[in-house]
């Protein structure tokens, strides 16, 4: 089954736990030996923090660090690129070896870029070319194989071939806990937004009531001219919608301004303990659409409800 697919969709990954050192700073992390295809599939070029290097360079004797790894090593966006020493214990080394070179392998590499994906990944991963990682570790077989294809038939054939000898998982299954947390966090934010909008929308009731009291004589005049309650409801409903639309436009404008100021000027700082100086923000049309839907939906319902209340109060007076 696998023979029917191009070799480019299969990515062997060589993973090894190593010690990285830069000056007096040291950090134990996992180094991944990959190809340029891995970088493209994981879109790592979209998550670069460095500006000197335009892409995630996987040239020989190079290393791309996660932001957490770079922080622990004291590496920043520098030019020329800093040199990192990679240490790996030799499997065949004797316990009595007194010479460090007999006990560990060491290799000097250049840091070409720093990227950030998510905290657990950033502090535990460094990316390097597959060629020197395989030669440095002496690995004969890859640690695992990534398959860049969503064909269920291919997955089923791989599962049938390996059986219980291998674990096969897609990206969602590999990071199940992370994705659950991200979904829960988004739902909580949306719930808070909806709750705030509901509370703010009750101001429509007060606004329409004040309008009704101010225009009470005009309303009686309209009634005497044959205006029905349904027509009055439509008038007050349109007033309520205008209030909702005005609040939506002002809120969206203020929110967009705050995001643009944070993005291009920087107001909220993350502090000195982070590679990125300012809190990252992004403008997303999906978020605009979702926010607009929530605000207008709740505002419309509250306007309908408050219109009925106002007409009922007028009828009782």
Image (spheres, helix red, strand yellow):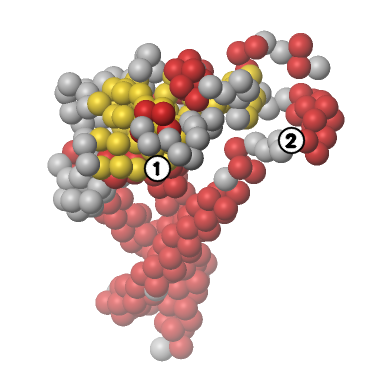
Structural crowding at the residue carrying mark 1, measured as other residues with C-alpha within 10 Å and reported as few (<14), some (14–19) or many (≥20): some
Disc ID at residue 28: 1
Residue 224 sits above or below residue 81 on the image = below
Q: Earlier in the sequence, mark 2 or mark 1?
A: 1
* For residue 216, side relative to residue 164 (left or right): left
Image quadrant holding the C terminus, namely bottom left
x then y, percent, for residue 74: 23, 41
In this rendering, the count of numbered labels is 2
Disc ID at residue 1: none
Residue 57 sits above or below residue 113 on the image = above
Front residue (pair 88, 45): 88
Residue 2, quarter of the rendered image: top right
x then y, percent, for residue 3: 76, 11
**Residue tagged 2:** 166
* For residue 209, side relative to residue 253 (left or right): right
Residue 161, quarter of the rendered image: top right
Residue 93 sits above or below residue 136 on the image = below
Q: Residue at x 42, y 82 (%)?
A: 314
């Amino acid at each position: 089954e696998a023979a029917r697919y191009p070799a480019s969709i299969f990515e062997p990954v060589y993973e090894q736990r190593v010690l990285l050192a830069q000056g007096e700073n040291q950090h134990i992390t996992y180094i991944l030996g990959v190809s340029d295809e891995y970088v493209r599939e994981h879109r790592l070029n979209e998550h670069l923090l460095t500006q000197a290097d335009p892409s995630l360079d996987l040239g020989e004797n190079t290393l791309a660090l996660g932001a957490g790894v770079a922080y622990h090593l004291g590496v920043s966006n520098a030019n020329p690129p800093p040199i990192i020493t990679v240490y790996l214990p030799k499997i065949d080394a004797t316990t009595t070896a007194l010479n460090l070179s007999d006990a560990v392998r060491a290799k000097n590499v250049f840091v070409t870029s720093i990227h950030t994906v998510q905290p657990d990944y950033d502090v535990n991963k460094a990316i390097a070319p597959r060629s020197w990682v395989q030669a440095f570790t002496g690995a004969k077989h890859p640690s695992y194989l990534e398959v860049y294809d969503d064909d269920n038939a291919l997955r089923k054939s791989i599962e049938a071939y390996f059986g219980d000898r291998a674990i096969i998982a897609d990206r969602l299954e590999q990071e199940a806990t992370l994705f659950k947390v991200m979904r829960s966090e988004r739902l909580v934010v949306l719930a808070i937004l909806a709750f705030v909008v509901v509370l703010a929308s009750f101001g429509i009731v007060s606004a329409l009531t004040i309008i009704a009291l101010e225009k009470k004589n005009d309303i009686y005049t309209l009634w005497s001219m044959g205006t029905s309650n349904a027509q009055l409801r439509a008038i007050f409903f349109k007033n309520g919608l205008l209030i909702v639309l005005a609040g939506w436009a002002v809120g969206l404008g203020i929110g967009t301004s705050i995001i643009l100021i944070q993005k291009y000027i920087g107001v909220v700082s993350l502090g000195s303990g982070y590679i990125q100086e300012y809190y990252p923000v992004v403008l997303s049309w999906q978020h605009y659409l979702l926010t607009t839907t929530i605000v207008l939906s709740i505002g419309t319902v509250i306007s309908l409800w408050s219109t009925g209340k106002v007409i009922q109060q007028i009828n009782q007076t």
